[in-house]
Amino acid sequence: MFSFNGYYLVDIFASIMLMKRYFIQLSYNGTAYHGWQVQANTLLTVQQTVNEMLSRLLNEPVSVMGCGRTDTGVHATDYYAHFDTSVDLFADEAKWIFKFNHALPSDIAIHKILKVRENANARFDAVGRTYKYFINRKKDPFNVNTACFIYGDLNVLEMNKASGVLFDFIDFSAFAKSNTQTGTNLCKLYFAEWKVENDLLIFTISADRFLRNMVRAIVGTMLEVGKGKITIEEFREIIESKSRSNAGLSAVACGLYLSKVEYPKDYFNG
């Protein structure tokens, strides 16, 4: 009998007829991974790790689709992915969550299994996303890979003025990674603000969608404003130019978190 990666083809065909779609809510520390998405040149991605765990425990080939890409070293506190399986996960949801987490490394955690319709899509059905960027103003050896450390004064008032400028635009080509297959660089922003919490400076930004590397490019350019290297008017001119070469360097990945993903009302009622 023919087999594929250890699975007999007759079993695969039979299980396809019984497939159900599930969402999982998870979080991960991205320090050890080359981002979310499976890559040909490395096995160290979050998606690859989750795929291997699910395939092993469910005893059938499983491939998850995530709600978006995160780059090397970027974290997620609220992330969603969908996959299909013939196994009834709701027969004992708590048991499966325990088994999944026991099999995963300590830097990835699954929090919920969610019921959705058969054609639900974690990536394309999301209607909003929120990112947070953490800057540590005081050197902390226990926060090395989970926040960006910046020494020196930053003018937070001016950085928040720059946040306000963002709402005058929908084309964020100036903050988009070059040579991507993105069809459009248009995004609708809902929220953007810098806030000081003790020794942390936190930037929160929400939109219907984000371009690859967009948040880190925005943060890096706003830091130029905070350091007095560019003015608010120059910040506006950078966005108007639609040229990535005019914007600042991308802020380091370790400070960035995907912190919230939103779906339509009643989406998870199955």
Image (cartoon, rainbow, N blue to C red):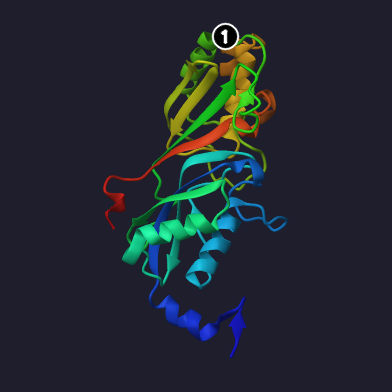
Q: Position of residue 199 (x, y in %)?
A: 55, 16
Q: Position of residue 145 (x, y in %)?
A: 64, 33
Q: Is residue 113 left or right of residue 10?
A: left
Screen quadrant of the N terminus: bottom right
Position above or below: 49 against 218:
below
Q: Is residue 245 left or right of residue 16?
A: right
Is residue 170 visible in the rendered image? The answer is yes
Q: Nearer the viewer, residue 164 or 148?
A: 148
Q: Position of residue 154 (x, y in %)?
A: 60, 11
Q: Position of residue 39 (x, y in %)?
A: 66, 55
At horizontal 29% and vertical 58% (from top left) the residue drawn is 270
Position above or below: 23 against 31:
below
Q: Is residue 83 left or right of residue 30?
A: left
State which quadrant residue 185 falls in: top right
Q: Residue furthest bottom?
A: 1
State which quadrant residue 232 falls in: top right
Is residue 241 visible in the rendered image? The answer is no
Q: Is residue 241 left or right of residue 113?
A: right
Residue that label 1 marks: 155
Position above or below: 43 against 26:
below
State which quadrant residue 117 falls in: bottom left
Instruction: Name the amino acid, label 1.
Output: Asn
Q: Nearer the viewer, residue 184 or 235?
A: 235
